[in-house]
Amino acid sequence: MSKSILELLFTAGFTSLIVGCSSVDNSARSRPNIIFIMSDDHAVPAVSAYGGFLAEIFKTPNLDRLADEGMRFNNAFCTNSICTPSRASILTGKYSHMNGVYTLEEKISDDQTTFPKLLRQAGYYTGMIGKWHLHTEPKGFDYWKVMVGQGRYHDPIYCEMGKGWSRDPEGGVGASYSGHVTDINTDFALDFLENRPKNKPFSLLLHYKAPHDEWEYNEKYEDFLADIDVPEPSTLYDDYGTRGYGIKLQTQKIGENHTFYENETGHLSGKARKAAQYQSYIKRYLRCVASIDENIGRVLRYLDDNDLTDNTIVVYTSDQGFYLGEHGMYDKRFMYEESLRIPLLIRYPKAVQSGIVNNDIVTNIDFASTFLDYANVGIPEDIQGESLRDLVEGNTPEDWRQSMYYRYWMHGAHFNIPGHYGIRTKDYKLIYFYSKGLGYSYDEYYPTVHWSYEGNIIRDGEPYWEMYDLKNDPNELNNIYDNPKFLSIRERLISELFELKDYYGDSDEAFPELFKLTRQYSGRN
Ligand code: CA
């Protein structure tokens, strides 16, 4: 055999070896895996890395590990503070008025482009585990195992791909699993990771039910926080003095509307009753979060043990914020900080420095673009969010957004909260409570569906504005809309708000009265 043939054989073998490596590299190594972990109603102060009013007595070591090893976003916001619409916005990268999921009731249409569908087309192995809460069968996944509707805390029912689907969680489709939902959800997520094809990058949506109401914690946390007084937020006894009718008439008031655990606090009245009911509520809530944190520890350990940590983007967030007693409330919906802000931690050791804090304004429509960007998949032009990749890697573009747009549609449908939209900049917030149903209120919308909610008394009412100086009044106690000192800032914010409405295509054209206002304020009569 001549030397040249040997050389030829060697070269051919070597080349095929390189090709072999390269194919593994492209599919499984160079593109990051993605785990998008989302809890339901997890407020920022209940993540100890954020150092809020609970941080002294409540620790989330595993979530804090993500912050320590990745990036913590201080100004991350949802675009519509309610469960189902938030999930649709995350999947599509679009506002509610673009994806058609405005309230808890609309179905997401099957033909919509979502980031899991695009990742799957690009060769990712895609999965969805946990609380789905959209009303059609999950699409775009190689595997799913989900709770439809709210799901149950104990012995939850899951529907599994290939074994039937029903919108009705108790409709006889699906199987019940014994135990607490947060543990079971994690079991299923680890099964997904264990059983996935190892030659493909993966994308897993891991969505927890907790800490949504009614906060049925795992019994093993029964004694957790039992013997201490949990600190109260400074606005627990807010009297709503300077604000409009929305916050005054809302029915999310601790100790007044939701009577938490009467057997513990029913004998009390006034401030003492509110204080006691706050304790009952917050302890249950935090016990649910403690379970979440424990289970995220299990996921992170799995990644460590299987050499996946470095090449996996782990995102932790919530579908919206939540009131942990601030302004005397529980629940969400308003554009005030507590329900607008979401916790957001992103760890990706390959690209993200550890322990970095980011203060840029980001929203839940940005996730889709971010994942597609990292997966090297083209971002469709009609996606409204922006990729966070540059931010995550410490290079925020100079022209990054300086404000965000928010809209809550369910006028009076739940807890008496009026429909509103607004703008938040780093320093100010301006909210327009347009106070009209527009087809999404209790009166106009809910009688047509299978449930209704008691305590709805507001109808179409007088619109009003609120404005806050977030630097000097971070708790939003002092509405400065009519304060002459802020007149020029107010005018600037109004212009910017309507520029954002234009930019995102939320012109209210279908609602003549509001449309007129939009045109008027944007200077286009
Ligand atoms: Ca939620």
Image (spheres, grey):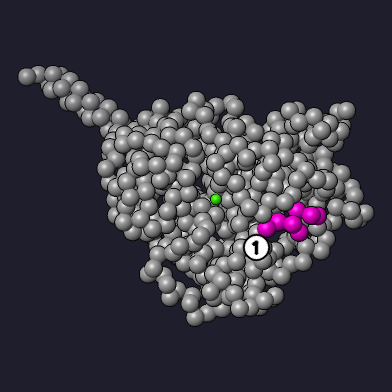
At x 90%, y 50%, the residue is 487
Residue 144 occupies which quadrant of the picture? top left
Farthest residue, direction right: 484
Instruction: Give the magenta-colored segment's residue range.
Output: 244-251
- Membership of 397 in magenta stretch: no
Q: Would you say 160 lies left or right of 76 here? A: left
Q: Is mark 1 within 8 Å of ligand 1?
A: no
Q: Position of residue 318 (x, y in %)?
A: 53, 51
Q: Position of residue 271 (x, y in %)?
A: 69, 76
Q: Would you say 43 lies left or right of 443 here? A: left
Q: Position of residue 254 (x, y in %)?
A: 64, 66
At x 70%, y 30%, the residue is 505
Judged from the image, the secondary structure of the residue bearing numbered disc 1 is loop
Q: Amino acid at mark 1?
A: Asn
Identify the main secondary structure in magenta. helix
Residue 385 occupies which quadrant of the picture? top right
How many numbered marks, from 0 up? 1
Disc 1 designates what residue?
A: 257
